[in-house]
Image (cartoon, rainbow, N blue to C red):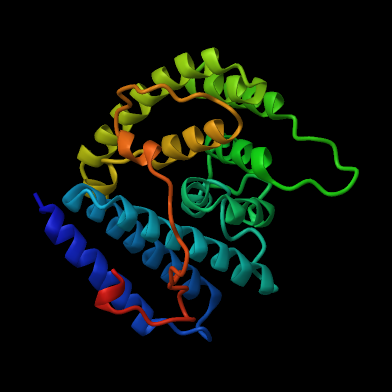
Amino acid sequence: MPTLRLYLENARDYVLDTAERYDPRAPLEARIEAFRVYSLALKMVAYARLLLESDVEGFFVNLYRVAANGLQLLRVVREEPQGTGRIPASSNDGLLAALVTAPALAGELATLSARERLPPEYEDEFLGAFFLQEAIRPRAPGEPPADLESISDRLEQAWEKETPHARALRALARRDWAGFDLAFHAWNQEAAAALDRTAEAAGAPWSLGLTRHVWLEGLAVLNLAEHQGCPLAPAVRPKIPGLLLRARPVLVGVNPLILGASRPGDEDL
């Protein structure tokens, strides 16, 4: 099994190599794939810095870079005539990373994200992502507020049963913090077990050996809930290190390392 140090070294290599090879004139699909690889590598750097060195600042800085590059990708795609329908709503590491590190970016990411399901995306995948978009998307003048409860209802219909995920989102929509705490705990248990099953399955992506250790979606939802007034009591939350909830990102002067706009070096990672 690869060590955390090996994951960190390989992730750094992917960041540097992808930045070196990136061609802004390449076909759109090639650029989308480059951003995918680059952002995943930055995410892996963030996780490895946290798990290997307990480097919370390094985690936040590199996760912020995931958010910034996620936003840049959506801008690139929007500028292309054939860009519509290329990025599913659930391909949302950028949005999740922004909710954790840079809420100011999250609103723009939500605005540019897909608002309809894009096959082969599953309905429940789309609705979970769409809920978060609608929870933070700036509203146009005269636009009604988001009907978040209806999205959580649709999520249950997609599953054809009541789920902790849908219950947690419904409680978040209602700002029912006691209900949210109970539902989130159950969802957290399910999600942590699912991450482990996926990572241990035959043919699982190599990166999951590292990224299985932090549940980014759960961390993002907790940050959103706290921002909306939820008191987060100390608790054991599988794959959500408590120090990430107690700390706050300090990103003044951080280079976002936008793919195609800057050339990262070893000292940046």
**Residue sitting at x 46%, y 70%:** 253
Q: Is residue 124 left or right of residue 193?
A: right
**Displayed quadrant of residue 212:** top left
Q: Quadrant of the C terminus?
A: bottom left
**Which x, y percent locates residue 104?**
61, 54
Q: Is residue 126 left or right of residue 100?
A: right
Where residue 19 appears, x then y in whole percent?
37, 79
Q: Nearer the viewer, residue 6 or 91?
A: 6
Q: Position of residue 259 (x, y in %)?
A: 45, 75
**In this picture, is 61 found above or below 225?**
below
Choose between 160 and 216: the one closer to the eye. 216
Q: Measuring 55% from the left and 31% from the top, which residue is drawn there?
A: 225
Q: Is residue 13 above or below residue 65?
A: below
Tell me if residue 141 can be seen: yes
230 or 111, nearer to the observer: 230
When the figure is inspected, residue 189 is found, relative to residue 116, above or below; the finding is: above
Count of numbered circles on the image: 0
Q: Say if residue 206 shows up in the picture.
A: no
Q: Where residue 13 appears, x then y in whole percent?
A: 24, 72
Residue at figure coordinates x 74%, y 48% from the top left: 138
